[in-house]
Image: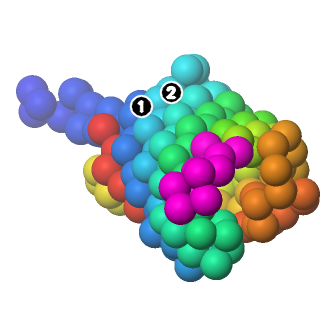
Amino acid sequence: MLGSSMSDTKAQPKNDLSIDFINLFVQRYVSLQYEFSLSNESSLALRLYFAPKSSYTGDYTAPGIGAAYRFYITNERAVSGFNLGPAVDAFFFSNSSLNRSTTVLSIGGDVAYKLLAGHFSVEPQLSLRFGAIGDYVSNYTGTYVYPSVNIGFAW
């Protein structure tokens, strides 16, 4: 049995590209996330956001950027399993009809569990943020908690 001594296990993914539409109904934005492994226990998640006009943003549209440093605290490797860590987001709100704009910076943390099935990933997440700096934009300033579900492709 020549081939039986070789391992048939697949390599653990080190990257994940995912999207979250859930927040279109909660915080009123869509997010795209790229996560990559920094070590066996940590990763960095980079995010792009877009908040379309809605009553929650006061008729503002808002692109945004964000990042989270994740610690994987189970026996699994980074980009799979239970994780938590600090996060920061910046939203750039503008209202063309009023010729008005503002920036909101929010800091906080995320708690999530990433499930992998082959290259398919599902990640329920709960985030806590404190939004500050800039004018008041409802749902993005003060302390707020929101759920999200990232669905993506891992490799």
Q: Which residue is mark 1?
A: 14
The image quadrant where one finds the C terminus is top left
Please, is residue 130 above or below residue 148 in the view? above
Let me know if residue 100 is in the magenta part.
Answer: yes
Q: Does residue 92 show up?
A: yes
Residue under the point 59% across and 69% down? 59
Q: Which residues are magenta?
A: 92-102
Residue under the point 65% across and 47% down? 101
Q: Does residue 81 show up?
A: no
- Circles 1, 2 touching at the beta carbon (< 8 Å): yes
Q: Which residue is mark 2?
A: 37
Q: Amino acid at mark 1?
A: Lys
Q: In the rendered view, does 24 fall on the left or right side of 58?
A: left
Is disc 1 surrounded by few (<14), some (14 to 19) or many (20+) residues within 10 Å? some
Residue under the point 66% across and 67% down? 57
Q: Secondary structure at mark 2?
A: strand
Q: Earlier in the sequence, mark 1 or mark 2?
A: 1
